[in-house]
Image (cartoon, rainbow, N blue to C red):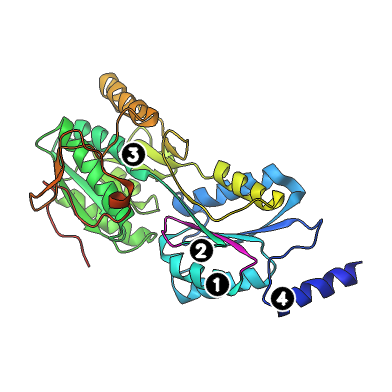
Amino acid sequence: MNILKKLAAGAALALGLAGAAVAGDPVKVGFVYVGPTNDGGWSQHHHEAAMEMAAHFGDKVELIEQESVPEGADAERVLTQMALSGADIIFTTSFGYMDATLAVAEKFPNVKFEHATGYKTRENMGVYSARFYEGRAIEGLLAGRMTKSNIIGYIASFPIPEVIRGINSAYIHAKKVNPDVKFKIVWAFTWFDPAKEADAAKALIEQGADVILQHTDSTAPQAAAQAAGNVYTFGQASDMAEFAPMPRISSIIDVWAPYYIRRVQAVIDGTWESDFTWDGIGAGMVGIGEISSAVPADVKAEAEALRDKIASGEYHPFTGPLNKQDGSPWLAEGEVADDATLGGMNFFVEGIEGEIPN
């Protein structure tokens, strides 16, 4: 029987049908990470969610992971090898993997692919992301209340819609509670590079920022803030609670495990279909970490009230009146941004200084 299984698997590979598991074999689930699985943030949280998924299914699944895979040609090689090794479903967990995932999905139609934070799909490739901008709204409120210098620093990774949405959402809600607030933005052009992230944090502190937000993956900005003293930060992707109550105020937590369990179960059941999932606080995909004791009780209550209003659907972070950076009208009073505009957002809102890099 083992010989027959090997022959069947070999025939499948020869025909480009990798991923078609023999009945009774565990489902092979692959994960590809842009950073190390101990980065303290994005990649580590995906890894921990993958481990939770594997523990949930036990011997029904076999987990395959590859960390620190650069975006681009390297990603395509890794994905091809995973597909050839018999993976049934592969999760690619960085925006820059999008085209590589699509290219490999076209070569292996019997393998299912799920790409995080992208927008391209096909019959065997789905997309999933979280509405991080909802969490950024709460961060913005807290930052606007906690700053004493009225200068908030923001370490941005790449100028893609996800990052631009986050900056806009944080700024809008900081400005609502503190009209004097200004944002200083440093583009790091990396997801994970502790040295660059630390340098960005130090540059922002030198410019007077006493609260720093980040859309990068390491804990280096927290360490830099801690060394500087009297500078607050936020956990990114994971709680980073070891930095509480100073410098960490709170955090955005990515909650991926339930999604991974649901999609792998669909593979096991034979019901998996390509889908586009974009969930937020209400659906449980975005979590808000504990607000530390550094935050006054009334400000904490204000932030929790905003969280609850977003979760219930009572309030949307992009609600007018809002103008674009050049002063042109965007959303009228009470008007809510549609997902198509948010999905392709390529502009700053009025009041943010600086240009979006090409």
Q: Earlier in the sequence, mark 1 or mark 2?
A: 1
Q: Earlier in the sequence, mark 3 or mark 4?
A: 4
Q: What distance separates the C-alpha of mark 1 from that of mark 4?
A: 15 Å
x 56%, y 47%: residue? 48
The answer to whether one can see residue 78 in this image is: no
Instruction: Report which residue position mark 3 lands on.
Output: 134
Q: 339 left or right of 347?
A: right
Residue 197: quadrant of the picture: bottom left
Instruction: Report which residue position mark 2 lands on.
Output: 122
Q: What distance separates the C-alpha of mark 1 from that of mark 2?
A: 8 Å
Expressed as whole percent of the image width and height from the top left, the position of residue 38 reads 51, 53
Instruction: Report which residue position mark 1 lands on.
Output: 106
The three-letter code of the residue at mark 2 reads: Arg
Q: Which residues are magenta?
A: 109-120
Q: Earlier in the sequence, mark 2 or mark 4?
A: 4
Q: What distance separates the C-alpha of mark 2 from that of mark 4?
A: 21 Å
| Label 3 Cα crowd, 10 Å radius (few <14 / some 14-19 / many 20+) | many
Say whether residue 166 is magenta: no
Q: Nearer the viewer, mark 3 or mark 4?
A: 4
The three-letter code of the residue at mark 1 reads: Glu
Q: Nearer the viewer, mark 2 or mark 4?
A: 2
Q: Secondary structure at mark 2?
A: loop
Q: What distance separates the C-alpha of mark 3 from that of mark 1?
A: 34 Å
| Label 4 Cα crowd, 10 Å radius (few <14 / some 14-19 / many 20+) | some
Q: Secondary structure at mark 4?
A: helix
The tally of labels here is 4
Instruction: Report which residue position mark 4 lands on.
Output: 13
Q: 25 left or right of 230?
A: right
Q: Earlier in the sequence, mark 1 or mark 4?
A: 4
x 66%, y 61%: residue? 88
The three-letter code of the residue at mark 4 reads: Leu
Q: Are marks 1 and 2 in contact (CB under 8 Å)?
A: yes
